[in-house]
Image (tube, coloured by chain):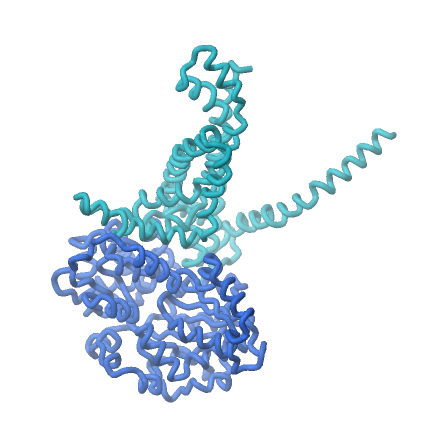
Chain colours: A blue, B cyan
């Protein structure tokens, strides 16, 4: 705490800047702009010893895979391992909302090979004909029976599986307890203190589902409500709170780490990652409820490199790889075999595995919220207010 | 007869020369713009996107983005003005004061930061203006509680920093061409340096300022990355409203209507600006002629 407000050091400055590389700046983009990409490519070609060790025949999987996911959501070492094994370079792009992913896919021509949709969006992707059933014979590491059906149900439509689970989690909020006094347990407190003593220090997601959903919880409405009257209440609350927010952004780790924000709507893994470096960070699930979710790996229709996409998904679902993922990003896996390899203290961490009474109040996002025009417009109005 | 042939030939050559550019503009500007106008009268499809219809509803709904229009129309001119105020002395130094030996190096130094991606440079500003950056230093000298990031100030800093070279170079070019004999004549006629600057140097360099301002202003009107990152989603431009409508709400028709309105607002402000510049320029130059 003593050196909390000291100016950032040169080393930390670069470290924090590099953090954006993993979060908000795509790896390839970063390597490109810094010239490091070219340097490694030249080095790699000049020294045969550094060429990828190929488990697959040369060129069998092509040379690039476009992977679209969320901020702070993978272990770079795993991606590097895949590149080493297959010679396939991975371009990572991160998004802040499912709506944005859907918009890109609807517009077409994304060039994505693998993307990470959340449970409630899959039925819409299917009905818009943007995804196809997966060929499970190419993903032997996915064993349906090893996953809790509660988490993977929405990926199965008419008996066909359209996506395989990456991990699950909850949406609550992180609080910097060194700077926020008093116990926080509800969404009511979250919003009241945002426009009260924490004015200017709070962040919400740039994401209609969680931002509107948790504003709805203030009034005790369903997280998934599309009722115009209830949504009007939520909008009023959001617009009242807006001048008191620090920012509207789904990539909130940098601001929490820098101390610019002391509270933010947050997902499980970000809370785990933040707490790892800042023990004063607490993760709160509002007593009123909120969201529980599963994220999946899926392959968009017309993906340029489906062979690499299947190989990548299967690689990531390998229990040993997946357990490393869980330890890096801090989201719990739905896979029994993976959990057997995850350290005990993680399986007992209440951030990953909240108490049953908190869990039972949570709702899975509903498909209707993704396409509801009113929710979309309220989010847009809130941002432009 | 011969004259007619020449004329025909001339037309052919003209068509040949103008053809590529015209095709380019037709296919990549006029046609897409026509699609945008068409879409702006449509409806949002149930799952988002565009559904054909004929309605003015999108235009009637524009008021709901009033704040975004207002923010853009206030911040873009202010940003342009600040850019000009900061750029002018730099350009003046480069063109008039700097020794020719250093000039090229200095010009290159202005460009060098722009070899790094804009995104990364804005992230750097995020850290510089964040609470462990400038505010932490201010705290050391006793000024506490300063918050810079996610304010209009931060957005302005980002905009001025981001577009400065676009202002420096046109001004530099116009000052570099300044005929030094005019300055001598002014001095011979008894004007002091300040008066010479106001009555000779500045008017002669105004076309450079006008060009730079136009370049910067047009880009600032369409800006969305800087307000999104340094404004934290709180300082909202029309560009941000557009990104939201297309990439989040997936309300293409309303997005199209906002885009059409933005183009119209931009055209109107540029015409107004050009008139202003031309009328002033005309007045100032009359006595010289």
B236 lies above or below A326: above
Give the residue at x 33% y 60%: A15
Q: Position of residue A161 (x, y in %)?
A: 45, 81
Query: Which quarter of the figure has residue A376?
Result: bottom left
Give the residue at x 26% y 68%: A271
Viewer-side residue, B98 vs B113: B98
Q: Position of residue A354 (x, y in %)?
A: 22, 76
Q: Is residue B252 left or right of residue A8?
A: right
Q: Is residue B104 left or right of residue A149?
A: right
Give the residue at x 48% y 27%: B206
Viewer-side residue, B61 vs A257: A257
Viewer-side residue, B183 vs A152: B183
Q: Position of residue A101 (x, y in %)?
A: 44, 64
Viewer-side residue, A246 vs A321: A321
Q: Position of residue A367 (x, y in %)?
A: 38, 70
Q: Is residue B242 left or right of residue A328?
A: right
Q: Which quadrant would the C terminus of chain B be assigned to in this image? A: top right
- Total marks in image: 0
């Amino acid at each position: 705490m003593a050196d909390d407000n000291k100016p950032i050091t040169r080393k930390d400055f670069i470290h924090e800047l590099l953090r954006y590389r993993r979060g908000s700046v795509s790896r390839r983009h970063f390597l490109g702009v810094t010239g490091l990409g070219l340097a490694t490519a030249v080095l790699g070609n000049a020294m045969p010893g550094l060429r990828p060790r190929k488990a697959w025949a040369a060129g069998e999987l092509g040379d690039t895979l476009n992977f679209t996911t969320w901020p702070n959501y993978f272990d770079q070492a795993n991606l590097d391992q895949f590149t080493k094994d297959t010679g396939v370079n991975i371009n990572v792009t991160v998004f802040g909302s499912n709506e944005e992913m859907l918009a890109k896919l609807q517009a077409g021509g994304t060039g994505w090979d693998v993307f990470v949709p959340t449970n409630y969006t899959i039925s819409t992707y299917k009905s818009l004909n943007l995804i196809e059933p997966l060929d499970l014979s190419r993903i032997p590491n996915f064993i349906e029976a090893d996953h809790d059906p509660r988490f993977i149900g929405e990926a199965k439509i008419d008996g066909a599986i359209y996506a395989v689970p990456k991990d699950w989690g909850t949406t609550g909020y992180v609080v910097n307890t060194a700077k926020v006094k008093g116990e926080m347990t509800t969404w009511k407190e979250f919003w009241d203190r945002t426009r009260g003593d924490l004015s200017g220090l709070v962040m919400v997601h740039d994401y209609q589902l969680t931002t509107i959903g948790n504003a709805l919880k203030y009034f005790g409405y369903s997280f998934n409500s599309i009722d115009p009257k209830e949504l009007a209440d939520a909008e009023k609350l959001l617009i009242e709170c807006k001048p008191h927010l620090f920012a509207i952004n789904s990539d909130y780790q940098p601001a929490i780490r820098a101390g610019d924000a002391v509270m933010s709507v947050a997902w499980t893994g970000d809370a785990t990652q933040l707490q790892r470096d800042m023990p004063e960070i607490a993760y709160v699930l509002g007593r009123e409820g909120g969201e529980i979710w599963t994220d999946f790996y899926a392959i968009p229709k017309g993906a340029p490199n489906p062979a690499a996409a299947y190989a990548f998904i299967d690689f990531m679902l390998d229990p040993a790889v997946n357990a490393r993922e869980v330890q890096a990003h801090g989201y719990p896996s739905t896979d029994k075999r993976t959990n057997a390899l995850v350290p005990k203290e993680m399986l007992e961490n209440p951030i990953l595995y909240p108490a049953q009474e908190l869990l039972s109040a949570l709702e899975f996002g509903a498909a209707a919220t993704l396409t509801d025009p009113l929710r979309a417009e309220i989010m847009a109005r809130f941002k432009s207010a | 007869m011969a004259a007619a042939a020449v004329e025909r030939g001339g037309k052919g050559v003209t068509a040949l020369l103008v053809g590529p550019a015209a095709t380019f503009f037709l296919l990549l500007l006029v046609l897409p713009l026509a699609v945008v106008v068409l879409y702006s009268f449509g409806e949002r499809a149930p799952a988002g996107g565009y559904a054909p219809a004929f309605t003015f509803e999108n235009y009637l709904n524009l008021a709901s983005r009033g704040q975004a229009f207002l923010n853009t129309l206030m911040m873009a001119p202010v940003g342009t003005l600040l850019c000009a105020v900061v750029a002018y002395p730099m350009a003046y130094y480069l063109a008039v004061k700097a020794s020719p030996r250093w000039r090229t190096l200095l010009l290159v130094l202005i460009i060098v930061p722009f070899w790094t991606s804009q995104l990364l440079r804005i992230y750097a500003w995020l850290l510089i203006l964040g609470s462990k950056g400038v505010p932490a230093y201010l705290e050391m000298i006793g000024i506490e509680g300063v918050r810079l990031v996610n304010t209009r100030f931060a957005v302005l800093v980002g905009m001025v920093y981001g577009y400065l070279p676009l202002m420096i170079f046109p001004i530099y070019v116009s000052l570099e061409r300044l005929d030094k004999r005019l300055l001598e004549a002014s001095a011979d006629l008894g004007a002091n340096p300040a008066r010479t600057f106001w009555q000779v140097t500045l008017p002669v360099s105004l076309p450079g300022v006008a060009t730079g301002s136009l370049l910067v202003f047009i880009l600032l009107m369409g800006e969305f990355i800087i307000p999104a990152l340094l404004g934290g989603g709180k300082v909202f431009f029309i560009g941000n409203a557009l990104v939201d409508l297309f990439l989040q709400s997936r309300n293409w028709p309303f997005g199209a209507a906002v885009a059409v309105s933005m183009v119209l607002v931009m055209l109107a402000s540029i015409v107004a600006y050009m008139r202003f510049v031309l009328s002033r320029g005309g007045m100032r130059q009359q006595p010289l002629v």
